[in-house]
Amino acid sequence: MNGGFDFEKPIVELEGEIGRLRALAGEGTVDVAAEIESLQKKLDAARRDIYGNLTPWQRVQIARHPQRPYTLDYVRLMTEGFIELAGDRFFANDQAIVGGVARLEGRTVVVVGQQKGRDTKENLLRNFGSAHPEGYRKAYRLMRLAEKFRLPVVSFIDTPGAYPGIGAEERGQAEAIACNLRAMAALETPIVAVIIGEGGSGGALGIGVGDEVLMLENAYYSVISPEGCAAILWKDQSKAAEAASTLRISPRELLELDVIDLIVPEPLGGAHRNYELAAREVKAALLGALDRLGRVPPGDLVRRRYEKYRRIGSFTEE
Amino acid sequence: MRFFARRIKVKKRDIPAGVWTKCRRCKEMVTSQEVEENLMTCPKCGYLSPLPAPARIRSLFADGEFHEIDARMRPADPLKFVDSLPYPKRQQSAEKRSGLPEAVVTGIGSLGGFAVACAVMDFEYMGGSMGSVVGEKITRLIEAAIEKRIPLLIISSSGGARMQEGALSLLQLAKTSAALARLDAEGILFVSVMTNPTTGGTTASFASLGDVIVAEPGALIGFAGPRVIKQTIQQDLPDGFQTAEFLLAHGMVDMIVPRRELGGRLAAILSLFGAPRFRSAAHAPRQRRPRREGAEA
Ligand SMILES: [Zn+2]
């Protein structure tokens, strides 16, 4: 779908109208320059108004936009010479998580990331970005590889959650995620995680422990999906918008809670409106993080990462 | 501070003696007293109801040496979370229901004569959910195990992360797992016991990271809840799916041990791994002045 969301309707209508006038202008029969200019002003104002005041639920919808750039889009736009590495060496090659090595501005990095499909066929292959244990174990293997060669890990997070299914349980979904959490905490090489779309709970965290955690402006990161939370606490799935606000899942709120470290701006209206610009912003933020981490003495890295997570939480003691 | 003398009395939680209840599994009528005396085990079919943390501690630390730590830690309300009830109200009713200030009790004690750092979760406090307090208490306990070089024992009973603390509760998975990475590097034993039920974020973090993992018979153990799985795959789940026995068959736990035998089995494991004998002077926690660290949010 390219049509946009309900809340974008005024924008889509204005864009349509301008398009029609441009077509007329192209025929050279009428002069519509003045009219286009006035509509363009209205369009700019509508964009600023709507995109500048997105509700948490609207951001969730943008984060799930089927045309949103995915992990492999960023890899393609930001890196050179990407070589994909496959499989967990135990059971399968889970294509809901991709990984490999690539060159990012001259340095080799190990990439892991959840990958959604662009169409039905690819979504079946990618399981809508919901990984099985094999996906987490593939990521584990690649992170160990990164450690061996002291290559930084760049992790792209974009999943509705780890897959809840029979095979996933049989093969230890929980164990696979838990092992990654423990391994990432102690990995002797820099890790930068970027939440590019959906940060769905343990499935996101399973590749999301990092020295720095970056988050795109219209991504979300939550302990439970807004729908799931609404179903459990409100007993009403249609209260998802309310749950999205209550759960504090937007980047600004998560920055205040120390859950993330940096917000990466998106093109106006969302990353799906301009892949190149989105990738440029992500790349700049990543390089900044890698530079900062490059200045940390290697012996301090794991201790600093421990302290970063050690601080997180809110409680009282009297 | 001695645990039993001072801090926790095992409450007869709204089940007065002589009252009949229906077993959730076999549907037989049994007296509540019988069930309680049997560590919440149904005398007819062996079904295990969640065991309150104080009763669990009494059953495992039979010689009475259990020194609670961080007993004063309480939850905050960092998100100002309100659904049908504000979170602080839920905390209050959970406290009333469980008789505990949070969903985990941590301490250092003598199990069969061996020193252990032990956490026991309590399902009656908001479904044993893991928020900041559970994450912090377990992390401090792991750090205490490292400092004192004694084995770690965590008895889980939990539905997962606590929604009311949002992403902060999610990150407790990372925090506790990071502490376990240190424990690992220090070469200290961790025994994880999964009881009915242990699901969600708890299994996706510390509960699955034991060097030895023990499960209780029939316990529901899994990552996703059965209802969510059923809804996702639109199929009925196989018989016995996500039970302790299922996990044993799939290589996810080491053994299944009945509730009554747990203490003996744990002591045997501690002994084989060379756990130190409990000595009050070396292992009992020092009294700490209350700290405010971590309460900044
Ligand atoms: Zn029964």
Image (cartoon, coloured by chain):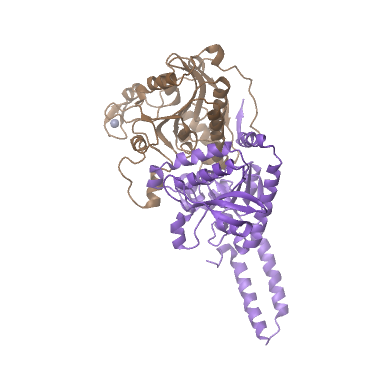
Where the N terminus of chain B falls, by quadrant?
top right
Position of residue A120 measured from the top left corner of the image (x, y, whole percent): 45, 62
Q: Which chain does purple denote in the image?
A: A
Palette colour of chain B = brown
Q: Seen in the image, is A93 located left or right of residue B20?
A: right
Q: Residue at x 30, y 42 (%)?
A: B239
Q: Quadrant of ligand 1?
A: top left
Q: Seen in the image, is A301 located left or right of residue B135?
A: right
Residue A50 drawn above or below residue B117: below
Position of residue A272 measured from the top left corner of the image (x, y, whole percent): 59, 62
Residue extending furthest bottom? A29
Residue B78 drawn above or below residue B257: below
Which of the two residues, A234 or B161, is positioned nearer the viewer here? B161
Q: Residue at x 67, y 82 (%)?
A: A25
Res. A43 visible in picture = yes
Say which quarter of the image contains residue A313. Answer: top right
Position of residue B167 measured from the top left corner of the image (x, y, whole percent): 57, 42
Which of the two residues, B55 or A81, is positioned nearer the viewer here? A81
Q: Seen in the image, is B33 located left or right of residue B167?
A: left
Say which quarter of the image contains residue B193. Answer: top left
Q: Residue at x 71, y 74 (%)?
A: A38
- Count of picture labels: 0
Where the C terminus of chain B falls, by quadrant?
top right
Residue extending furthest front? A149
Residue A254 drawn above or below residue B158: below
Which of the two residues, A86 or B2, is positioned nearer the viewer here? A86
Position of residue B58 measured from the top left corner of the image (x, y, whole percent): 43, 19
Res. B71 visible in picture = no
